[in-house]
Amino acid sequence: MSEVYFIGADIGGTTVKLAIIKENGEIIYKWEIHTNTDNQGKSIPEDIHKSIEETLAAQEITKEKIAGIGAGAPGFVDTNTGFIYEAVNIGWKDFDFGNQLQELSGLPVWVDNDANLAALGENWLGAGHGSQELIAVTLGTGVGGGIISNGQILNGANGTAAEIGHVTVIREGGAPCNCGKTGCLETEASATGIVRKAKAIAEEYPESSLKSLVSSDTLTAKDVFEMASNGDEASQAVLNDVMDTLGMAIANLAIAINPEKIVIGGGVSQAGEQLLKPLQEAFKKYALRRTASASSFQIAQLGNDAGVIGGAYLVKNNQK
Ligand SMILES: [Zn+2]
């Protein structure tokens, strides 16, 4: 029997990550192209199509071997049609992405939200280990999320299920969020949120390493983790505060789906145990004891490949 391949495409605000992937999930070739957001991102389907054609030719893989393309976009997606309601970072609004790419490529195309694809990828080949019930949270410049329930990714009535970053965690006086609300989880627990929180808390610790770095105006979330691990009390206070909020938000979601696995990914998750320990403590504090006893926290394992692997899974799962 001849081998079949999948193409995964993970569309971000600056690059589109692409990969040719075997049925067992092994990446045989991966590459990136620039995301051209000029002209409301209209050229992106064509850019992706051309790049796939060129790469398949260079890799000497015929199109007949490709079962389809699974693509992730950072926005609200109609997964039945691949229609993008809105993807702010790309410039898409009411954009018929899935059909365009399907027409250009002549291949079946499935589209989902990028954080949902990352959750599917992690659940297939990463930290999820094929869980039926899973919450995935991506902590980067924003906060993304994906929820798998009864083995299926949740999309919701109009593509906003599992938008974990926009769970309200500060009722009044929270920072404004890109979504138009204030006090979203994303404003508190993203890398940007950690820095903002650090600036506020540093004022209470005039002698701390945190305070001196805040004054120099070069502070990053990574610095906060580093200083905390070197014993800086102020930085530890920032992390405790942020993880308390994140733990509460995840515990509230956990009441809804009773997860077996909670997978934390994204750049901030590189802090590993230093992040997991206070997060798990907070989670236990806010979750039902029985809910907490069923769930274990894991750091994501696939890194930047989670999206393209999730794309391949989408094809694998939907192909005829
Ligand atoms: Zn928001």
Image (tube, rainbow, N blue to C red):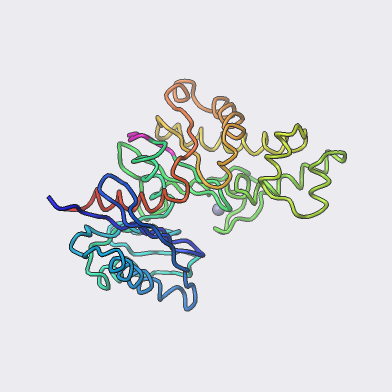
Q: Which residues are magenta?
A: 129-135
> Is residue 233 magenta-colored?
no
Task: Report the residue at 32% width, 34% height from top.
Answer: 132
Left or right of 114 on screen, residue 63: left
Task: Report the residue at 44% width, 63% height from top.
Answer: 32
Quarter of the view holding residue 99: bottom left
- Residue 133 screen position, x and y as percent: 36, 34
Chief SS of the magenta region: loop
Q: Relative to the observer, which residue lies in front, 146 or 285?
A: 146
Q: Say how many tags the image has.
A: 0
Left or right of 17 on screen, residue 275: right
Residue furthest right as drawn: 207
Quarter of the view holding residue 226: top right
Task: Report the residue at 39% width, 57% height from top.
Answer: 30
Q: Relative to the observer, which residue lies in front, 246 or 216?
A: 216
- Residue 35 screen position, x and y as percent: 47, 68
Please determine whether, in this image, residue 92 is positioned above or below residue 225. below
Q: Relative to the observer, which residue lies in front, 111 or 48?
A: 48
- Residue 277 screen position, x and y as percent: 59, 28
Please determine whether, in this image, residue 92 is positioned above or below residue 233. below
Left or right of 212 on screen, residue 69: left
Residue furthest left as drawn: 1
- Residue 66 screen position, x and y as percent: 23, 59
Left or right of 207 on screen, residue 68: left
Task: Report the residue at 38% width, 53% height from top.
Answer: 308
